[in-house]
Image: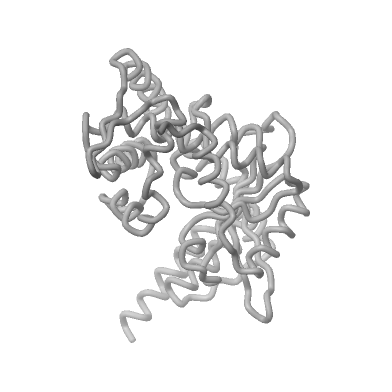
């Protein structure tokens, strides 16, 4: 029996509705309310582990259709929870832009590659917004699956196709992760990816034959060529877009000084005072912080 888009959407909706720590949910609600958002997505390692330590990763999705600049806007926030400081790194963009990026209509590769991986719809302003986010995440799965089928072998396991996809998307961006990151993604999220590829391919108009755990996507040569052309353009623009976003973040990352100070102290043990000057001009303050860090490490080695 063939499965249609509704089967993929039902699966996505169930995955997005996973239980979340109330402290994280309240943080997301507060951020969403303050931004006038339509929805907030939660993703990253803290979603998988349930830990409140480290930095929580949120996407805040706004109303409207026009982005004011290169998206997303990145900010850092802190919130007290029963004497414990919760920290969050927040990416903010329009829900309409998010949906277009997830569908593969835009040059961007980050949205559909990121959100075919696990995420949680942690807060939505109403059922309409919730439905739009679910549809966008389903689009991300279809976009990723089409490229996976194109880049992967003629026949193989689902892991073979996902591995080919993530290897390609990581190489198209500036990444600091070590080689083989795609294997880590698949191993720690095995339950999430189990059975997802056939559903996403079918919903995207690419039926696949099954022989045990082996899949054979039925991709016509003309369609394969079209998808490869689509990917070639996005691969070529991947690193330039990443660079533009990094440049933007270096000047517009709200709370960058507090975020950097926390990271430095967490990883090196050196407290960094967040002065008004450092808060306002984090780039200008960076050389002194780096000098202090070098001295701190020298003292550690000497001691």
Say which quadrant the C terminus sits in: bottom left
Q: Residue 100 appears at what percent x and percent y?
A: 58, 29
Q: Residue 118 appears at what percent x and percent y?
A: 47, 52
Task: Give 245 or 60, whichever is nearer the viewer.
Answer: 60
Quadrant of residue 257 in the image? bottom right
Q: Give above or below for 30 relative to 235.
A: below
Q: Is residue 225 left or right of residue 89?
A: left
Quadrant of residue 255 in the image? bottom right
Residue at the far top in the pictured view: 222
Asked if residue 8 can be seen in this view, the reply is: yes
Q: Residue at x 59, y 55 (%)?
A: 17
Task: Give 16 or 214, whichever is nearer the viewer.
Answer: 214
Q: In the rendered view, how is the structure colored?
A: one colour
Say which quadrant the N terminus sits in: top left
Task: Give 9 or 167, whichever is nearer the viewer.
Answer: 9
Asked if residue 284 can be seen in this view, the reply is: no
């Amino acid at each position: 029996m063939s499965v249609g888009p509704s089967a993929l959407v039902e699966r996505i909706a169930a995955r997005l509705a996973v239980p979340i720590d109330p402290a994280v949910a309240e943080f997301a609600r507060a951020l969403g309310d303050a931004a006038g958002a339509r929805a907030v997505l939660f993703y990253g390692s803290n979603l998988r582990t349930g830990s409140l330590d480290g930095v929580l990763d949120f996407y805040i999705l706004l109303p409207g259709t026009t982005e004011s600049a290169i998206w997303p806007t990145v900010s850092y926030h802190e919130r007290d929870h029963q004497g414990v400081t919760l920290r969050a790194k927040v990416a903010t963009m329009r829900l309409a832009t998010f949906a277009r990026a997830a569908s593969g209509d835009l040059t961007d590769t980050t949205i559909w590659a990121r959100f075919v991986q696990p995420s949680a719809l942690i807060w939505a302003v109403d059922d309409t917004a919730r439905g739009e986010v679910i549809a966008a995440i389903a689009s991300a799965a279809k976009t990723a699956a089409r490229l996976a089928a194109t880049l992967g072998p003629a026949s193989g396991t689902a892991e073979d196709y996902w591995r080919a996809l993530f290897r390609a998307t990581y190489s198209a961006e500036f990444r600091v992760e070590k080689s083989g990151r795609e294997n880590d993604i698949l191993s720690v999220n095995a339950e999430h990816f189990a059975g997802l590829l056939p559903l996403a391919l079918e919903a995207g108009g690419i039926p696949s034959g099954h022989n045990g755990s082996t899949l054979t996507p039925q991709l016509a040569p003309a369609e394969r060529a079209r998808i490869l052309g689509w990917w070639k353009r996005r691969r070529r623009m991947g690193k330039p877009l990443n660079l533009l976003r990094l440049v933007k973040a270096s000047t517009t990352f709200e709370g960058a000084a507090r975020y950097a100070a926390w990271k430095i102290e967490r990883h090196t043990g050196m407290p960094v005072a967040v002065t008004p000057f450092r808060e306002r001009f984090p780039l200008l303050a960076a050389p002194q912080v780096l000098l202090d860090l070098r001295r701190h490490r020298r003292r550690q080695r000497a001691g």
